[in-house]
């Protein structure tokens, strides 16, 4: 995660695709925790997102799926 902005519906974060390297902004909804798969909007390859929350701190890990 390189950037984070709080939104009423969740957190907008800037991530880099592990497949094509493109930077993309994604919304992590406020209730989201755990692992989920999301496709890159540029190269369409799937990512594995791991979302952890500790209080107000958000940690997102992105890896090729």
Image (cartoon, grey):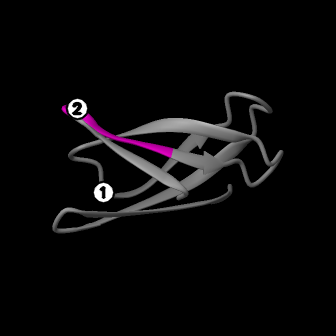
Q: Is residue 11 above or below residue 56?
A: above
The secondary element bearing badge 2 is classed as loop
Residue 60 location, x and y as percent?
46, 60
Say which of marks 2 and 1 sits in front.
2
Residue 58 lies in quadrant: bottom left
The stretch in magenta equals 8-13
Residue found at the very far top of the displayed protein: 41
Q: Determine if the magenta segment contains residue 11.
A: yes
The residue carrying mark 2 is 9
Which residue is pictured at 49% across the width and 37% down the height? 26
* Crowd rating for badge 2 (residues with CA inside 10 Å; few <14, some 14–19, many 20+): few
Q: Are marks 2 and 1 in contact (CB under 8 Å)?
A: no
- The residue that appears at 30% across and 57% down in the rendered structure is 33
Measured along the vertical axis of the image, is residue 54 above or below residue 41?
below
The residue labelled by disc 1 is: 33
Q: Earlier in the sequence, mark 2 or mark 1?
A: 2
Query: Going 71% across and 48% down the picture, which residue do you hit?
Result: 17
- Which label is found at residue 56? none
Mark 1 is surrounded, within 10 Å at the Cα level, by few (under 14), some (14 to 19) or many (20 or more) other residues, namely some
- Where's residue 13, x and y in %? 46, 45
Residue 47, position as x, y percentages in the image: 64, 49
Foreground of the two, 43 or 24: 24
Q: Main secondary structure of the magenta part?
A: strand
* Percent of width and height locating residue 23: 69, 42
Among the 4 quarters of the image, the one containing residue 40 = top right
Spatial separation of the CA atoms under disc 2 and disc 1: 14 Å
Question: Does residue 29 belong to the magenta stretch?
Answer: no
Q: How many marks?
A: 2
Secondary element at tag 1? loop
Q: Residue at x 74, y 31 (%)?
A: 44
């Amino acid at each position: 995660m390189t950037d984070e902005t709080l939104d009423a519906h969740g957190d907008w974060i800037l991530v880099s695709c592990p497949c094509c390297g493109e930077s993309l902004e994604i919304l992590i909804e406020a209730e989201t925790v755990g692992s989920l798969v999301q496709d890159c909007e540029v190269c369409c390859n799937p990512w594995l997102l791991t979302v952890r929350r500790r209080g107000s701190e958000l940690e997102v890990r992105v890896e090729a799926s």
